[in-house]
Amino acid sequence: MTLFYYKAVTAAGETLEGQFDLATRDEVIGKLQDAGNIPLDVREADSGDSGSLFGALFKRATLRDAQVVQFTQQLSTLLNAGQPLDRALQILLDLPETEKARHLLERVRDQVRGGTPLSDALEAEHGNFSRLYVNMVRAGEAGGSLGDTLARLGDYLERSRVLKGNVINALVYPAFLIGMVLISLFVLLVVVVPQFQVMFADMNVEMPLITRIVVGVGATLKSFWWLIIGLVVFLVSWFRKRMAEPVSRLKFDESFLRMKIVGDLIRKIETARLSRTLGTLLKNGVPLLSGLVVARNVMVNTALAQSVDAATDEVKSGGGLGHALAQSKRFPKLALQMISVGEESGELDSMLLKVADTFDIEVKNTLDRMLAALVPATTVLMTVVVAVIMMAIIMPILSLTGSIQ
């Protein structure tokens, strides 16, 4: 017998944590499902925290986001075409581009052929398939609609990947621009400015205040660059440590929500993420309370996640989801109105997916406007900085020229 730690969600939306002393993980999962619960995490009690530093270093993360999406969509297509699961997995073995990805699919196929449910086989591949992914596959298996579930899951993952890719692509040019300007400024301050300082000292030229400031900045960078790098590393480490503390993280996330433009953008992103996740879960037959607990885990902003927790408690008491989410006054009014309409019409799952589509478009438009303004704003800022440095060099020269005349 082995001691297993488990975490699960009840049909009422309550989170259960505990231990079972059973022979295998399958027995633990089966016992939880027989009791009407949705397993979130099942592992040996002495296996350590999968989120630890060493676990993060050595986890077998071999599939990229695009590969996970491709695997999901292709497996859905094969299953909906009538192929048995093990046969579909065998067909997919010829598609991975890397040997590691092929070995991963081989392990999944072998476990499925041995009688292990697909959800358990995917869960065993730590770092490749998220908790949401595994739970949705498990719900599809329980409802007998694995092909349709994978189709919805593939659509969800593809939308998330496209949005992430659009943001990254839009940031490439501004990041390159900022990087090149910073390198240029560093060369000016560390290499060029000190040479003029020596010339001015030899000619006994009195340097204006702006020149002394620029020269001082250059001297500091040249003499203490190692200290500046160390300070940056220390501040980043300190910030990450603070963000690991729940109270500090909550205050930080709340302050972000209070920002005019950034806060609105975060609300839209998190609302779209929550709505698409919950809507997909409800489409697959997951109860609302259980779906709220699972969907809450995909949210990044802890302040909004806390609001979802409070809404879950109110839904347990018989309240509507739209009204419950409105109590925190943190979610967009349009989303709340659409959710309320979905509840009244009995089509909450479809309405949640429409909310996600609506706010995905709004997020894309907002990001496009922000990124379009970022390039000229960065250019103007860097031009001003370079102009200040050049002015600091030219002013003593002009003063020297005037005294000669």
Image: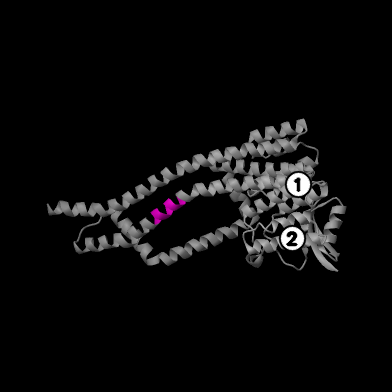
- Report which residue position mark 2 lands on: 108
Q: Give 208 or 253, whichever is nearer the viewer.
A: 253
Taking the spot 59% from the left edge, 38% from the top edge, the residue there is 361
Taking the spot 53% from the left edge, 60% from the top edge, the residue there is 236
Q: Secondary structure at mark 2?
A: helix
- Report which residue position mark 1 lands on: 81
Q: How many residues crowd mark 2 within 10 Å: few (<14), some (14–19), many (20+)?
A: many
Q: Secondary structure at mark 1?
A: loop
Q: Between marks 1 and 2, how big is the CA–CA gap?
A: 20 Å
Q: Position of residue 324 (x, y in %)?
A: 73, 38
The magenta segment? 174-182
Q: Please state which amino acid type lies under the numbered disc 1.
A: Ala
Q: Give 79 or 142, whichever is nearer the viewer.
A: 79
Q: Give 34 or 334, whichever is nearer the viewer.
A: 34
Taking the spot 81% from the left edge, 62% from the top edge, the residue there is 114
The colour scheme applied to this rendered structure is one colour
Q: Position of residue 317 (x, y in %)?
A: 80, 40
Q: Please state which amino acid type lies under the numbered disc 2.
A: Val
